[in-house]
Image (cartoon, grey):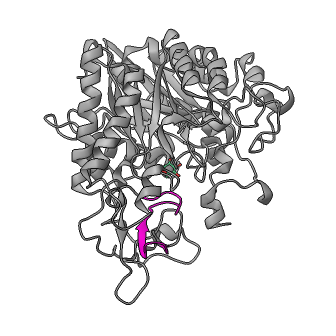
Amino acid sequence: MNAAADAAWWQRGVIYQIYPRSFQDSNGSGVGDLAGIERRLDYLRDLGVDALWLSPIFTSPMADFGYDVADYCAIDPLFGNLAAFDRLLAAAHRRGLKLLLDFVPNHSSDQHPWFVESRSSRDNPKRDWYIWRDAAPGGGPPNNWISDFGGSAWQWDGVTGQYYLHAFLPEQPDLNWRNPGVRAAMMDVLRFWLDRGVDGFRVDVLWHIVKADGMPDNPVNDGWRRGDNERDRVHQVHSTDQPEAHAIAAEMRAMADQYGAQTGRERVLIGEIYLPFDRLSRWYGTPDRPGVHLPFNFALALSRWDADGVGRLIAEYEASLPAWGWPNWVLSNHDVPRIAARLGDRQARVAAMLLLTLRGTPTLYYGDELAIGEVAIPPDRVRDPREARQPGIGLGRDPSRTPMAWDASPNAGFSSAEPWLPLHPDWRDRNVAAQSGNPASMLSLHRQLLVLRRREEALTLGALELLDAPQGVVAFARTGDGRRVTVMLNLTSRDVSLDWTGQPLLSTHGECAQRGVLRADEGLIVA
Ligand code: GLC
């Protein structure tokens, strides 16, 4: 599997996540759309990424901005229609870009016809497609499960006198994956998009899709304090990561593989799974019964940014991988703070070098290539339901979802109308046009890193060995194809003496590297 000749496109490639509402608006709605993405495909090809993953574009009341799907096989009119989708897919393929969709199997919208039927009466044939329970004997919710967005995970439904389960918003009822009808219908959804030619899926909250039989209370988290995320009041032992879910992942994988084999075009499945490494690695499945190709590794997005910690997590992650498991890395996404908001401009450059030189498939989040940083969202512009349900404790995701900035024209070239979320404050200077012409910009650094990654087989597919390094520095070697490429990253803002050897290939500081030192906030690649 690691031999270069056998490597699949998703092992060599770099994935780029687009939040469609915020990439490019083409019709003056203030919200991005598919025709807008199509207009920007040349930018993505020139950037040097290989695949685009679109957050959900399906019909949705947008209670959770598309993660509440009312029709899995149609495009929301805000984004376009199926014809616009087919055009986008063909245009991406013409440029050699793959396209991945966001499949949301754990829950639908409460407006989905399946749920409308399910809630209509207790004996409706779709009743069991969702998870309905009587009130607890003394009244109240059936168990102590907490929604990831705060509050009980159970919603009372007066019409039929039962509660239904929602791991997220009440507008996102959980589907019952123990029901064979649900399973078959959802596999049909995958087939629908695979037949249209998509190259794979990112699977939303995959580790949530099956709940423990009998649904016992989750163990209470004694460490929880008022002001913490309500989700963490309990440990999600019985509501997530059930063994039965692996069989479902394997079924999805078998379908993806079957399409790959039939068409000679391999399809990829990426699982959104927030778990520690030992449990994450199980989602690769086994050689006989593979699970998803890439269980998302969010460690870098969630951990403290210091050399010891980062070095340790690289070692622990690598050690946790089964022999058949291909690694992957993520710095940020639409649910967590942007990398430059967390680390500032200088360390964001070091982080970009890390992401694009580690072993495994990187996923780059739109706008991070410009180092879009903090965006303050005024209270009257908050859109994220997670912030709305637990205000003021730092859970809001709007700051990570603001529009892409293309140039210095009104609304940054994103839209002819006021965008649905504000732009970052420095968009007039921090935009694609401004950074394109500047060899020292974050965008240029990304382009250079992506060229280098593609050119150096050692970086694309080579082995990784962590190296001893002075305090504050993460260093590793990538070897392959007879080359040894060394990456040294100074995670501090002071110069560190370091006797490196070899020819510099790229420094985050642009101008020539200096012997005997790794400068403050410098990342350096030598060979
Ligand atoms: C995933 C998505 C997130 C969404 C949630 C519920 O975590 O990334 O944006 O709110 O699932 O669908």
Please determine whether, in this image, residue 32 is positioned above or below residue 36.
below
Residue most extreme to the right: 410
Q: Residue at x 40, y 59 (%)?
A: 118
Residue 431 shown in magenta: no
Residue 170, x across and y down, in percent: 52, 63
Q: Which image quadrant: the N terminus?
A: top left
Residue 333, x across and y down, in percent: 55, 42
Residue most extreme to the bottom: 138
Please determine whether, in this image, residue 20 is positioned above or below residue 195.
below
In front: 143, or 61? 61
Please determine whether, in this image, residue 210 is positioned above or below residue 143.
above
Dominant secondary-structure state across the stretch colored magenta: loop
Q: Which residues lie in the magenta part?
A: 157-173
Q: Is residue 115 left or right of residue 84?
A: left
Q: Residue at x 31, y 38 (%)?
A: 187
Residue 128, x across and y down, in percent: 32, 60
Residue 172 shown in magenta: yes
Can residue 66 be spotted in the picture? yes
Residue most extreme to the top: 94
Q: Which image quadrant: the C terminus?
A: top left
Residue 28, x across and y down, in percent: 78, 31
State which quadrant residue 131 falls in.
Answer: bottom left
State which quadrant residue 226 falls in.
Answer: bottom right
Can residue 359 be spotted in the picture? no
